[in-house]
Image (tube, rainbow, N blue to C red):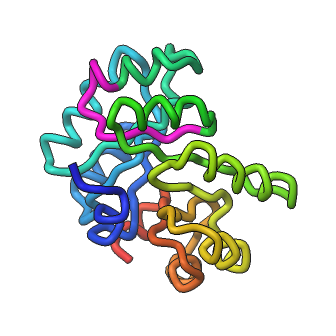
Amino acid sequence: MQSMMELLEVSPVVAAIKDEKGLTRALESDCHVIFILYGTICNIGAITEKIADAGKVPIVHADLINGLSMKDVAIDFIRDNTKAQGIISTKPMLVKRAKELGLLAVQRSFIIDSMALDNMKKQLEAFEPDAIEIMPGVMPRIIRQIRSQTKTAIIAGGLLTDKKDVMAALEAGADAVSTTSVPLWSV
């Protein structure tokens, strides 16, 4: 399995999908990495299988899958019952469990104030995720600050609306952006 940094070098725009229509469009796109932001324990296996069968990398947002708990066993379920190569979570303990199981682990952090920024830094040190997804992604100054303090892959996500936003995030030091905006998947 490739490292997160290697995947993001190949695919600096990550397709984030929230429904079946998005899945279809993502499979047709040039995006190599797909963040899955919807599903249930009944269909997440089929969703990840479609993505993997298309030669793309499925990464499941564990917090958003209906029927999963916010406990370690949820990550075990994803590993054992899907073709996901990794998970996204706002819960550091789920990120830690994913790493223990050999899955790619993306820590999603909402940077809403200086306390959230400090907390995110502590979580990076404690849990060593493969990537951190910073929300909202339209904060170049904060991205630059985080880049100067870590070698962890940085993904900017949320509120990116045009090519200018994508380029600003990448120029500030993000390794990739994640977006549900289909037109941005071809940037």
Left or right, 52 with reference to 134: left
> Residue 133's spot in the image, x, y percent?
56, 55
- In this image, 91 relative to 17: left or right? right
Would you say residue 43 sits in the magenta stretch? no
Q: Which residue occupies the foreground of this view, 173 or 118?
A: 118
Indicate left or right for 30 with 88 as reference.
left
Q: Give me the residue at 22% from left, 57% from top.
A: 28
Q: Position of residue 138 (x, y in %)?
A: 66, 71
Residue placed at 58% from the left, 67% from the top? 150
Which corner quadrant holds the C terminus?
A: bottom left
Residue at 52%, 64% (x, y): give it: 154
Residue 84 colored in magenta in the image: yes
Q: Which residues are magenta?
A: 79-89
The quadrant holding residue 87 is: top left
Q: Position of residue 1 (x, y in %)?
A: 21, 48
Count every numbered label the image shows and give the total: 0
